[in-house]
Image: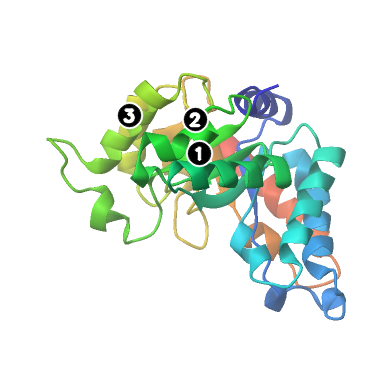
Amino acid sequence: MTFTDKLRARWTAANSLVCVGLDPDPAKFPDAFSDDEDALFAFCRDIADATAEYACAFKPQIAYFAAHNGGESALQRLIAHINAEHPEVPVILDAKRGDIGSTAEQYAVEAFDRFGADAVTLNPYMGRDSAQPFLQRGDRGCVFLCHTSNPGARDFQELDVGGEPLYQRIARTIAGEWNSADNCSLVVGATFPEELKVIRGIVGDMPLLIPGIGAQGGDVEAVAKNGRTADGSGLMINSSRGILYASMGADYAEAAARAARELRDTINRHR
């Protein structure tokens, strides 16, 4: 089953558009992990197990693991755990890779073979040849940055390129030229709902990964209204901190599950 097939099946089976972001910061972990040398893995494993029934995808952010000694091993074990225990939930490695072809080939091996992710986030700035090693893995997903959620997104992404903003050119090119294997998606920030509406109009039913809900100020209703497809799906609405750190107490896993369920229900009210 391809990434896209797996994601679409999950939207239906779980009745959820929630993407659970796994961005572990040991400084924010519950006290139970204060002396745990395996805290990165153990905390994220518990969160994944608690929230899996409400998730359409998991999105571990590689920097939060790689910044710590042994962190990449913890990430590898975490994805292996999710693949074994929750194989129906796709895993998107948030790595934002993008480099010359020979290096990109190694990054593709890293994401798909070493870590076992179903998809990876990518930067399209260096063009088609930098994306080709990922695109040619038709069973895996390529999630390209398009219009990101940060304030600085306007610095370059909205520059005019031949009569249209750069982000629209990116959306049009990826949807029209790069997506021959139906394995492409785009990252579009929840903080730019009008741009989200434009992008949806350009790319049709292509899946969109939506960061920026919660701490960054994105509005669930606006995202659902502007980004959903005709059947009420098409979105992976990411929440990281709001789910991961829903409680600092012994009930951290149960609190994460409640937060994921509440977000799912909130999204569903606007689908």
Q: Is residue 46 left or right of residue 224?
A: right
Q: Earlier in the sequence, mark 2 or mark 3?
A: 3
Q: Residue at x 78, y 55 (%)?
A: 47
Amino acid at the residue labelled 1 = Val
Residue holding disc 2: 184
Q: Disc 2 versus disc 1: distance between alpha carbons?
A: 6 Å
Q: In this figure, which residue is indicated by the disc labeled 3?
A: 173
Binning the other alpha carbons within 10 Å of mark 3 as few (below 14), some (14 to 19) or many (20 upward) gives: some
Q: Residue at x 72, y 31 (%)?
A: 14
Q: Residue at x 17, y 36 (%)?
A: 164
Q: Kindly indicate the quadrant of the structure image that contains residue 222.
A: top left
Q: Which mark is residue 143?
A: 1
Q: Tell me what residue is drawn at x 84 percent, y 74 percent.
A: 33
**Residue 153 position (above or below residue 174):** below
Element type where label 2 sits in the image: strand
Q: Say which label, 2 or 1, has the lower sequence index.
A: 1
Vertical placement of residue 46 versus 262, above or below: below
Determine the image quadrant of residue 194: top left
Label 3: which secondary element: helix
